[in-house]
Amino acid sequence: MESDFIAWLRKRLPSHPLLRLGPGDDAAVLRLAGDAECAVTVDLLSDGVDFELSKVDPRRVGRKALAVNLSDLAAMASKPLAGVVALLLPRQGAMELAVELYEGLLPLAERYDLAIAGGDTNTWPGPLVVSVTLLGQVAAKGPLRRAGARAGDRILVTGSFGGSILGRHFDFEPRVQEAMLLNERYELHAGIDVSDGLSRDLAHIADESGCGAVIRLADVPISDDARRLAAERADGVLPLDHALGDGEDFELILAAPPEEAARMIREQPLDVPLTDIGEFVDEPGLWSLNESERKNKIVPRGWEH
Amino acid sequence: MESDFIAWLRKRLPSHPLLRLGPGDDAAVLRLAGDAECAVTVDLLSDGVDFELSKVDPRRVGRKALAVNLSDLAAMASKPLAGVVALLLPRQGAMELAVELYEGLLPLAERYDLAIAGGDTNTWPGPLVVSVTLLGQVAAKGPLRRAGARAGDRILVTGSFGGSILGRHFDFEPRVQEAMLLNERYELHAGIDVSDGLSRDLAHIADESGCGAVIRLADVPISDDARRLAAERADGVLPLDHALGDGEDFELILAAPPEEAARMIREQPLDVPLTDIGEFVDEPGLWSLNESERKNKIVPRGWEH
């Protein structure tokens, strides 16, 4: 089916100023900008792990496969430039599925002005696998890394957390514009996007930065989804637990020096809320502060790959 | 296992001048060269389709996953720069398998001075899937495309064809240096690497170029593997049939104007033989010339994705 699919794709893909040569040759050719550094990220999603194809519109799968990569570029405060898509499709209905996956990801690509340069399309007897690789342009300031948080920095987060399994893990908006705007306008020391879970990804920043982090539990923004999930399941897992551990929120966690963080919180420059949930500290590990200000060591929860 | 694997990878990956930031963050960061155009290619290999993991050293699988992508860059006459690797590993023994795959691909990466920037590592209950994305630098002349052959151009090939299933489909040397040298030193109109089969990939060049191609059968370089396979199987499939249809030879097919082609054949500038096997013609389709100079229309054979 690959030649039929490439014929479809050549008609369907919009032209893009970065794309000198699109699908159908041995490689795509991009006109990348002059001297800027280039961020590269790849994420592979598979049926049964990241989605259940039997239960979801394939367009949402295609969209998610691109969105998780855009979120990685956001975490580096990099501007999305171009991407390639590798598909491994179940043989039955492969062409239709490939078209639906692209119909899901292309609107998101257009929204972020991303050039889709084609990719590789294969069939096999197994379940669907989608791998997307994106290139992004690093900001003039350099990449926003995980390492870089310092003791005393505030922990800021975009949006709210928990319960993404109810649907948001497909339909979230990657924080690309938000990350670029914050990185340009403020001094940020470190950043990550929340895929594994708020507590686990915060621990990643702290570990990479050689410090610890204290979360003020009362300040964690809990999503309506987290409350709904806790109520539906009624299994004793609190909305706060969902917020700390569920993962796939694809919000940003940022480290910023205290005065800068105060200014960000005061100015609220984004459409989505920016919340201060604690601080980075010298002592390694992850800590929580409850309402009586008692500090407890906590174990990061969330998705362990 | 991903965090353990990333820890291993950070120690194992050699530093590289292009690699500003390697594995372990949300994206890798590359220092790409100034104004050159960038070739991007991705190839995804899966157990049962491109290899049988139960029958082969995983290091050969890792090497092949990289080599097929290098061959795509060769087909564009582009210089390999950097790559990312996405793995989907069976849960049982995932870490060991990931290490072996990298131990197979890293020596080949070093040989071509390719920066491996890390990637994505996942586990699941299914078979092994490996997806590699490479970036290459397009030559100042521009990319060597499939489209561009003209009626009257000669068909030149590197090496010999057929029987790669006996082992060469794992251990072939991608024609990276050869393609760059030929593209720099001679006027080439079009090029492709042979993955699907000599006749099918020649048909790809002809179709994309809006012309046809005539193969002089007596001049097709038949590999020893093709002869061995035909003798072993003794099923009436001739060595020539293997050469035309087997695929995964990863040799180059090139289109060059007649005087230039004659010069290339005379000078033999490569370590591997360069052979003239026919010409591109106005009339569309694929044709063969037998020893009595009778022209027959032939159907491209080989791997249909």
Image (tube, coloured by chain):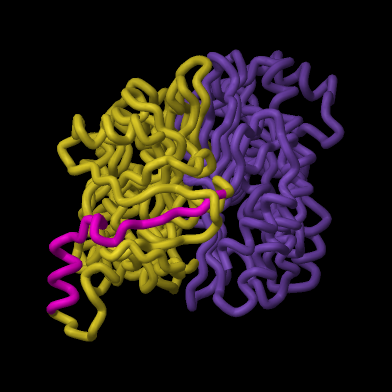
Chain colours: A yellow, B purple
Is residue B144 inside the magenta stretch?
no
Q: Looking at the picture, tell me which residue is in the foreground, A278 or A32.
A: A278
Inspect this view and state whether residue B132 appears.
Answer: no
Extreme-bottom residue of the structure: A235
User: Which residue shows up at 58% across the image and 21% down it?
Assistant: B189
Q: Count of labels shown?
A: 0
* Among the 4 quarters of the image, the one containing residue A107: top left
User: Which residue shows up at 69% across the image and 52% down it?
Assistant: B243
Inspect this view and state whether residue A52 appears.
Answer: yes
Q: Looking at the picture, tell me which residue is in the foreground, B166 or B240.
A: B166
Q: Quadrant of the N terminus of chain A?
A: bottom left
In this picture, residue A20 sits left or right of residue B40: left
User: Which residue shows up at 28% across the image and 59% down it?
Assistant: A61
Q: Is residue B206 above or below residue A7?
A: above
* Among the 4 quarters of the image, the one containing residue A12: top left
User: Which residue shows up at 73% across the image and 15% down it?
Assistant: B185
Read off the magenta span. A211-231
Residue B221 lies, in percent from the top left, at 76, 44
Q: Is residue B195 above or below residue A260?
A: below
Residue A253 lies, in percent from the top left, at 36, 47
Q: Is residue B178 above or below residue A296?
A: above
Is residue A221 inside the magenta stretch?
yes
Q: Looking at the picture, tell me which residue is in the foreground, A150 or A161.
A: A150
Residue A48 lies, in percent from the top left, at 36, 73
Q: Looking at the picture, tell me which residue is in the foreground, B274 or B291.
A: B274
Residue A113 lies, in percent from the top left, at 28, 30
